[in-house]
Amino acid sequence: MAVAVWLCAREARYCSHMPDYHDDLRFAHVLADAADATTMERFKALDLAVETKPDMTPVSDADKAAEELIRTALQRSRPRDAVLGEEFGTEGHGPRRWVIDPIDGTKNFVRGVPVWATLIALTEMGEGGDHPVVGLVSAPALNRRWWAVQGGGAYTGRSLSKATRIRVSRVNRVQDASFAYSSLTGWENLGMLDGFLELSRSCWRTRGYGDFWPYMMVAEGSVDMCAEPELSLWDMAASAIIVEEAGGCFTGLDGRRGPHSGNAAASNGLLHQELLGCLNQ
């Protein structure tokens, strides 16, 4: 019932007057084009430099170069907007903030696995805090890109002029659903492993795709639900609006809407309460 009420409220909000973010979406595509060129040039490079950050995750010279490129372009074209990036933190203040993950899936990137992407989102302060209004996910090694703007639907394609609208699935039973996840470790650390395993056994199919990809597959209807136990805002902001604009639900494991809970659960909406119920046993 809570999800149904939320979806109705969202539709009502979209019918009211809202700012037009399409110029920002077009700019996000320009940023992604430049980032794609930078990251693809370094993908599988023999001299790729990789360091270990204090949180024990890897960062490559491509991560840093892509984020620096995006920040420079934002400073030039959107100087009043704040920026939050995975590699260089927060810069600036104001109601509008660009949230950047230069390479989501760095471990894949450094091992030559093509499942990684640049995530670009624009958030704006509103009632209840800031929320994503533009989201773009570009996976150049897969030759795929997804995007959404508030109130405008979700799309996939290589450009704005060559796009296909995407929508979530209509699967309404867990036993018929495809469930995607990243790994088991985090669920055990949260004390949610039993619920996770029960959900996995109940589903028609489970796959550990990881990172951005499960959320994009939820948005385009090839996967019905996915969840991750530990994430940062830059991991989720772009995916959250894409899933929502495709007709789905994106919340934390606590049921809080949006990308601010430190973890994520995404679904086609029809399965969301069951997804949260199983994981929170």
Image: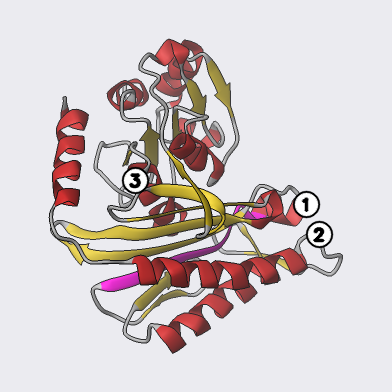
Q: Is residue 191 magenta?
A: no
**Which comes sooner in the sequence, label 1 or label 3?**
1
Q: Element type at marker 3? A: helix
- In the image, taking residue 78 as reference, residue 136 lies left or right, namely right
Residue at x 23%, y 73% (from the top left corner): 95
Q: Foreground: 38 or 276? A: 38
Residue at x 49%, y 25% (from the top left corner): 179
Q: In this picture, is 75 found above or below 33? A: below
Regarding residue 87, the answer to whether it shows in the image is no
- The amino acid beneath tag 3 is Glu
Q: Foreground: 189 or 82? A: 82
C-alpha span from label 2 to label 1: 6 Å
Q: Which residue is mark 3?
A: 245
Q: Is residue 103 magenta?
A: yes
Q: Closer to the observer: label 2 or label 3?
A: 3
- In the image, taking residue 47 as reference, residue 73 lies left or right, namely left
Q: Which residue is mark 2?
A: 44
Query: x, y (%) of residue 204?
Result: 51, 13
Quadrant (top left, top right, bottom left, bottom right) of the C terminus: top left
Q: For label 2, count other residues whose C-alpha is less than 10 Å away and answer few (under 14), some (14-19) or many (20+).
A: some
Q: Foreground: 279 or 40? A: 40
**Which portion, as a residue range, is magenta?**
96-106
Quadrant (top left, top right, bottom left, bottom right) of the N terminus: top left
* Residue 112: assigned label: 1
Q: For label 3, count other residues whose C-alpha is less than 10 Å away and answer few (under 14), some (14-19) or many (20+).
A: many
Query: x, y (%) of residue 249?
Result: 32, 37
Prevailing SS of the magenta stretch: strand
**Which comes sooner in the sequence, label 2 or label 1?**
2
